[in-house]
């Protein structure tokens, strides 16, 4: 007689713990905070989401809450300094200014229920005239900016792609927060429409950057050399994005 061999029980993968969400008070400014445990994390990392509207924290798995709280207490000053560049009240309204291709435009709500949103120059001043209901002003401005961004980026991307004989399959305009643009191996380009608020040279750089990926799907020396060939003002544009890019994400169009 041979003893019956029991079958090994199948290993059931444990689901990762769901992220913890809470609200953090930073000197009276209430910030949504997401805390995520990561198996391979060896230290705590804290970052401000693009636009300065939320915080994201990654911690080692099983870290005690007291250590998380102590870390947040120690970094209150750092958060306060970093968040200072973001306006708490970032909603758009009549009389405020918004950038279009790096130029400040004063928002003028016409009071008319119908009409196109248009950028005009009146007595040497740049204006953005917006019709419709006041509560729809931000949404109508966003629609206008999206159209302007699509026109600029399609023209620039196809120009740069033609110069290096690289086919573009499609171009999409989105409101991405983690990156300004992307390029797939199939030749699909994607851009954040908020870039249209940046100076024209920065918009050109973003188009050239993603087109360069059609030839070099990496960020190696050959990629940067090609990118600079397409966009000689690359370094200045990169510096502008690094310094001011987050402010474009902070604008509330809702």
Image (cartoon, grey):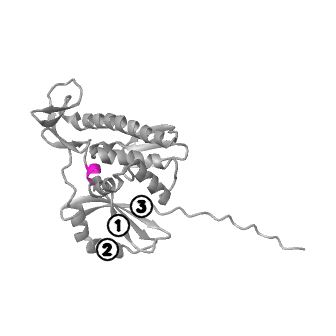
Place of residue 129 in the rendered image (x, y in percent of width and height, measured from the top left): 18, 32
- The residue closer to the viewer here, 209 or 90, is 209
Between marks 1 and 3, how big is the CA–CA gap?
Answer: 14 Å
Whether residue 247 is in magenta: the answer is yes
Label 3 crowding class (10 Å Cα cut-off): few <14, some 14-19, many 20+? some
Is 14 drawn above or below residue 204 in the view shown? below
- The residue closer to the viewer here, 167 or 81, is 167
Residue at 35% across, 76% down = 67
Residue at 21% across, 35% down = 137
Report the disc number at residue 119.
none
> SS of the residue at dot 1?
strand
Place of residue 243 in the rendered image (x, y in percent of width and height, measured from the top left): 27, 58
Q: Earlier in the sequence, mark 2 or mark 3?
A: 3
Residue at 18% across, 65% down = 27
Circle 1 is placed at which residue position?
46
Circle 2 is placed at which residue position?
71
**Bounds of the magenta segment:** 246-250
Label 1 crowding class (10 Å Cα cut-off): few <14, some 14-19, many 20+? some
Left or right of residue 121, residue 144 in this image: right
Between marks 2 and 3, how big is the CA–CA gap?
Answer: 17 Å
Circle 3 is placed at which residue position?
19
Q: Give the number of the mark in front: 1 or 2.
A: 1
> SS of the residue at dot 3?
loop
- For the N terminus, the quadrant is bottom right
Place of residue 147 in the rendered image (x, y in percent of width and height, measured from the top left): 33, 34
Residue at 39% across, 42% down = 174
């Amino acid at each position: 007689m041979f003893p019956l061999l029991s079958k090994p029980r199948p290993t059931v993968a444990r689901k990762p713990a769901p992220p913890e969400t809470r609200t953090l008070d930073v000197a009276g400014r209430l910030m949504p905070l997401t805390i995520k445990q990561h198996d391979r994390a060896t230290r705590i990392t804290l970052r401000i989401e693009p636009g300065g509207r939320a915080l994201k924290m990654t911690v080692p798995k099983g870290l005690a809450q007291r250590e998380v709280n102590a870390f947040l207490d120690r970094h209150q000053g750092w958060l306060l300094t970093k968040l200072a560049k973001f306006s708490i009240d970032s909603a758009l309204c009549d009389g405020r200014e918004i950038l279009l291709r790096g130029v400040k435009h004063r928002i003028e709500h016409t009071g008319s229920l119908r009409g196109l949103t248009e950028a005009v120059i009146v007595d040497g001043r740049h204006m953005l005239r917006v019709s419709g209901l006041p509560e729809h002003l931000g949404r109508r401005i966003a629609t206008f900016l999206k159209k302007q961004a699509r026109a600029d980026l399609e023209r620039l991307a196809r120009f740069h792609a033609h110069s290096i004989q690289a086919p573009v399959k499609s171009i999409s305009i989105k409101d991405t927060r983690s990156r300004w643009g992307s390029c797939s191996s199939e030749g699909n380009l994607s851009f954040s429409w908020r870039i249209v608020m940046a100076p024209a040279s920065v918009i050109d750089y973003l188009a050239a950057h993603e087109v360069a990926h059609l030839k070099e799907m990496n960020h190696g020396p050959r990629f940067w050399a090609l990118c600079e060939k397409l966009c000689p003002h690359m370094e200045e544009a990169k510096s502008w994005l690094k310094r001011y890019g987050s402010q474009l994400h902070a604008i509330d169009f809702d």
